[in-house]
Amino acid sequence: MARPKTPILSKPGIREAALAIVDRDGLEKLSMRRLAQELDVQAASLYSHYRTKEELLSDVANEVTSHIDVSRFEDGDWREGLATWARSYRAALAEHPNLLPVIASGPGRREEALRRADVVHGGLVGAGWPPRYATMIGASTKYLVVGAATQSFARGFDDDVRVYQDRYPNLSQAHRLAEVAAQIDEDGFELALTAFLDGLAPVFERVRVPVEDAEPSGE
Amino acid sequence: MARPKTPILSKPGIREAALAIVDRDGLEKLSMRRLAQELDVQAASLYSHYRTKEELLSDVANEVTSHIDVSRFEDGDWREGLATWARSYRAALAEHPNLLPVIASGPGRREEALRRADVVHGGLVGAGWPPRYATMIGASTKYLVVGAATQSFARGFDDDVRVYQDRYPNLSQAHRLAEVAAQIDEDGFELALTAFLDGLAPVFERVRVPVEDAEPSGE
DNA sequence: GAGTGAAACCGAACAGTGTTAGGTAAAACT
DNA sequence: AGTTTTACCTAACACTGTTCGGTTTCACTC
């Protein structure tokens, strides 16, 4: 076969198949040959659409994180803006846990992510945070989200799960533990997020700037 | 050559060489053949000492995180205990940033890490936190540390760095930016940690239990 | 001291990886 | 109708982690 009558491959189609493999079998099971096979095609053909595997994965990551909600920054309530953003971010990561290493390992020219970082920064500055604080808070909130997803209890990627097992031996039956672990992940994240935001409030009172001076100054 | 008069390889020696490669050239440049070459040996010989590359990396990770300071939990001050632990944890990760994906991707039967998780949990419970909270707080603190290390500004693994560049164009000269980025990482982490701990204080007052009832109950 | 078994290395190979070069036929455009 | 581009192909390259079987030397037992 040479060129088919109607194209078999497309960028969205490739992304979809790639994500399906990652979700189903794990990130390490995604190879270009396996992906090609899933699409009834030879591996080399994929390179007509994506220049490298990395570029493909970056694109998939972009798609997965593209529905994160930063809308609540618009009405000047930084606390609500941050909380909504963080929860929606966490939810996006939780939907495709196997893809997490890709997302966590930095932005690969992901325009959507950049635009959102800008909204977060702008929202915080607009609410009265000094630009430098806005940067730190945006980053810190992401620390919580990414860290929580990476070190998830329920995925077994947390040392505490073992301690927990030892201390509560009657929870060691796998199904009970999984159940409880998911709940602890959820509660732990909410506890951390709330404590963080609560702790930020007094800082805000100390460093807030009048709104008309809140524009970035170039430092 | 067959068996040498004095052994060339040893587990600590292999770990040291592996860590050197990771630190110098990056995690992805570490291959068994390259590691063997560095040790004047054939790749297959490494398998007499480590059964898999994964086991070796897990061991290296264990070594790197083995000096984390959990000593301050002993005198019942949970705040100081957490803060010291978190800072020392972060410092350990910062010393070998290229190894981070290995450390972040979960405990691979790393006994040291387990023992420390136990100290943290025990310290928090001993100070009066209910066991369930102790678990969540231990995990959450780690979220901050791991997240901060993973999404580091200075490593360019943070979207905010781009926003920052746009907003402060005079910082875009690479050396100035790197300088400032490291400082922001540091300040941002301290801000987040402090806010988190501050936010935890009122929760503690609400949920604290008398010390004699603080033993794990089995739920 | 001879014999035995384990230990520590080696060379060669297997099955897999991402990626590229060069070929072919159909589509799209001039 | 002729040309270029597109979208696929086969085959290969250079690499990866790992295993097999072999060789030599060490450490031990009788």
Image (cartoon, coloured by chain):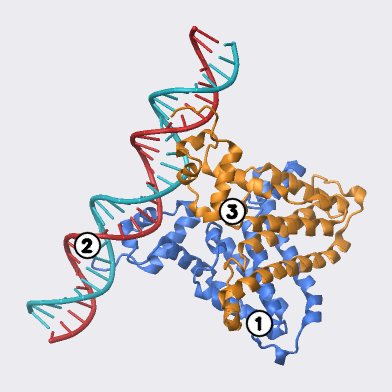
Chain colours: A orange, B blue, C cyan, D red
Residue C8 occupies quadrant = bottom left
Vertical order, B202 against A204 (above or below)? below
Q: Chain of mark 1?
A: B
Marks 1 and 3 sit apart, C-alpha to C-alpha, by 34 Å
What amino acid type should be assigned to the residue bearing mark 1?
Gly
Residue B123 image offset from top left, x and y in percent = 66, 82
Residue A88 image offset from top left, x and y in percent = 74, 56
Residue A10 occupies quadrant = top right
Q: Secondary structure at mark 2?
A: loop
What amino acid type should be assigned to the residue bearing mark 2?
Ala
Residue at the extreme front of the image, as rendered: A5
Q: Is residue D26 left or right of residue A46?
A: left
Residue appearing at x 54%, y 64% in the figure = B103
Neighbourhood count class around disc 1 (C-alpha, 10 Å): few under 14, some 14–19, many 20 upward: many
Q: Chain of mark 2?
A: B
Vertical order, B143 against A54 (above or below)? below
Neighbourhood count class around disc 2 (C-alpha, 10 Å): few under 14, some 14–19, many 20 upward: few
Q: Secondary structure at mark 3?
A: helix
Marks 2 and 1 sit apart, C-alpha to C-alpha, by 52 Å
Residue at the extreme bottom of the image, as rendered: B212
Give the residue number, with chain letter if any, for mark 3: A99
What amino acid type should be assigned to the residue bearing mark 3?
Leu
Give the residue number, with chain letter if any, for mark 2: B2
Give the residue number, with chain letter if any, for mark 1: B123
Q: Secondary structure at mark 1?
A: helix
